[in-house]
Image (spheres, grey):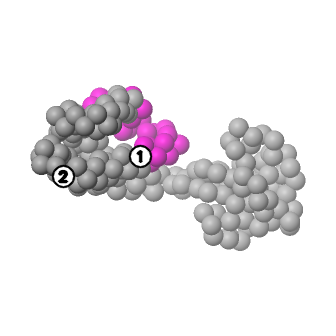
């Protein structure tokens, strides 16, 4: 069997594992000891979506079997959440300037700040999704008294309002949302992540 983990070929010695399911079970047990888990499986060149995992568990493994696994560790998720939080910290200063930029005709500068915001939020949400793989970690992240899922449901509505205000060229609403709605929430996220 050829095994690659996160793109790196690793030596593997099969013990009692006869099927894909046997191997994945023992691999996941070892990963769990290191606060890690598998996020994707490619078997013999074909991705195995989570909803189809049962269809490959009984397949035999032998010398010709090729498996590519992508894993993530709790430590890596925390590091990514902290990196995103650092991005938010850098953006917070700039968000307070959006009103002035828009009123002085510097729409492209304001747009680039909002684009960076959208990218940073997207990166954070992706990291938060990975955090759900570690229930204890995910449960420990409380923002404004809410879990991340509930917090981001509310936050995404504000981001949609911001997008609408930008499209309508409503500079007052864009400025108000940036300064009074988004900026405080980024601060709350940063404070929550600092506790990890």
Q: Tell me: 28 left or right of 148.
A: right
Residue 76 sits in which quadrant? bottom left
Predominant SS along the magenta part: helix
- The structure residue drawn at horizontal position 54% and vertical position 54%, both measured from the top left corner, is 72
Q: Which residue is mark 2?
A: 106
Give the magenta-colored segment's residue range.
Answer: 124-150
In depth, the one of 28 and 7 nearer the eye is 7
Q: Mark 2 or 1, which is nearer the eye?
A: 2
Q: Residue at x 53, y 43 (%)?
A: 133
Left/right placement of residue 186 relative to residue 11 reads left
Is 73 rendered above or below residue 192? Answer: below
Question: Would you call the spot at circle 2 few (<14 residues within 10 Å), some (14-19), or many (20 or more)?
Answer: few
- Asked whether 83 or 1 is in front, the reply is 83
Which label sits on residue 122?
1
At 86% across and 49% down in the image, what residue appears? 59
Rendered image: mark on residue 78: none
Q: Residue at x 64, y 63 (%)?
A: 5
Instruction: Please state the horizontal and vertical placement of residue 138, each as a whole percent of the image.
Output: 43, 39
Q: Is residue 48 above or below residue 79?
A: above
> Is 137 inside the magenta-drawn segment?
yes
């Amino acid at each position: 069997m050829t095994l690659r983990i996160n793109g790196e070929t690793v030596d593997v010695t099969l013990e009692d594992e006869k099927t894909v399911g046997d191997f994945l079970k023992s691999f996941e047990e070892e990963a769990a000891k290191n606060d890690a888990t598998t996020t994707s499986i490619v078997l013999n060149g074909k991705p195995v979506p989570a909803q189809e995992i049962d269809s490959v568990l009984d397949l035999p493994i032998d010398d010709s079997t090729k498996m590519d696994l992508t894993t993530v560790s709790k430590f890596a998720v925390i590091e990514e959440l902290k990196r995103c939080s650092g991005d938010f910290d850098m953006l917070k200063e700039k968000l307070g300037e959006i009103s002035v930029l828009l009123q002085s005709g510097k729409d492209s500068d304001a747009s680039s700040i909002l684009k960076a915001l959208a990218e940073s939020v997207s990166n954070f949400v992706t990291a938060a999704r990975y955090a759900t793989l570690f229930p204890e970690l995910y449960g420990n992240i409380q923002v404004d008294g809410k879990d991340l899922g509930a917090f981001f449901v509310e936050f995404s509505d504000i981001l949609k309002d911001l997008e609408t205000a930008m499209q309508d060229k409503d500079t007052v609403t864009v400025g108000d949302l940036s300064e009074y709605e988004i900026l405080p929430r980024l601060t709350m996220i940063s404070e929550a992540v600092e506790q990890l």
